Amino acid sequence: MTERTTIVDLPQTAASCPPPPKGCGAPAGSLCTLHGGTRPHTTNTHRARTDAWAVQTATCTRAGCEAAPGHPCRDSDGQPMTGKAHTPRKRAALRAAHLEGEAR
Ligand SMILES: [Zn+2]
Ligand SMILES: [Zn+2]
């Protein structure tokens, strides 16, 4: 089995990972680590990192939220969602990143 670099499929590594316990605190451009930093996480990142990255880069596409890049999503009560993003926003961010990757 050949080892593949999967970082290309993890555009959210452009953002830093939130500190524990939600994430591992990995700096931007580095892979997430598991088990207290002893093992790099090559196939995925902490969910909190994807959320943070989506908030930074994408506009939320969820009706009634539609938060602009850099602004947190808001829940149904209009309260900002800290450390979380709506799923459609994450999908939009991932889709945009993959389109960019294909255009190169
Ligand atoms: Zn992490
Ligand atoms: Zn949202």
Image (cartoon, rainbow, N blue to C red):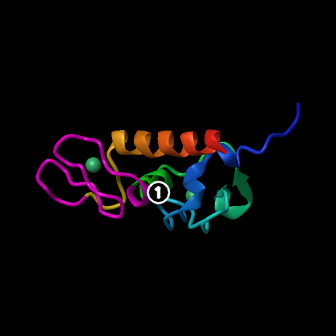
Horizontal and vertical percent position of residue 2: 88, 35
Give the side of residue 19 with respect to residue 68, left or right: right
Name the foreground residue: 99 vs 18: 99
Q: Which residue lies furthest to the right in this view?
A: 1
Please tell me in which quadrant of the rendered image residue 32 appears. Answer: bottom right
Quadrant showing the N terminus: top right
Residue at position x 77%, y 45% from top?
5
Q: In this view, does 29 lie above or below 86?
A: below
**Image position of 48 (left or right of 60):** right
- The residue pinned by badge 1 equals 53
The three-letter amino acid code for the residue at tag 1 is Trp
For this rendering, which residue is in front, 35 or 6? 6
Q: Give the SS element for disc 1.
A: helix
Residue 72 locus on image (x, y percent) = 29, 60
Label 1: few (<14), some or many (≥20) within 10 Å? many
Q: Who's the residue at 29% across and 57% down the image?
A: 68
- Residue 88 within the magenta-colored segment of the rendering: no
Residue 39 picture location, percent across and down: 73, 55
Q: Is residue 16 above or below residue 12?
A: below
Q: Position of residue 47 (x, y in %)?
A: 48, 49
Q: Is residue 86 left or right of residue 56?
A: left
The correct choice, above or below, for 19 with respect to 100 in the image is: below
Q: Give the range drawn in magenta.
A: 55-80
For this orientation, the residue located farthest to the top is 1
| 63 falls in the magenta region | yes
Q: In which quarter of the image is residue 104?
A: top right
What residue lies at 31% left-to-right and 48% top-to-bottom? 60
Query: What secondary structure prevails in the magenta region?
Result: loop
Nearer to me, 83 or 39 = 83
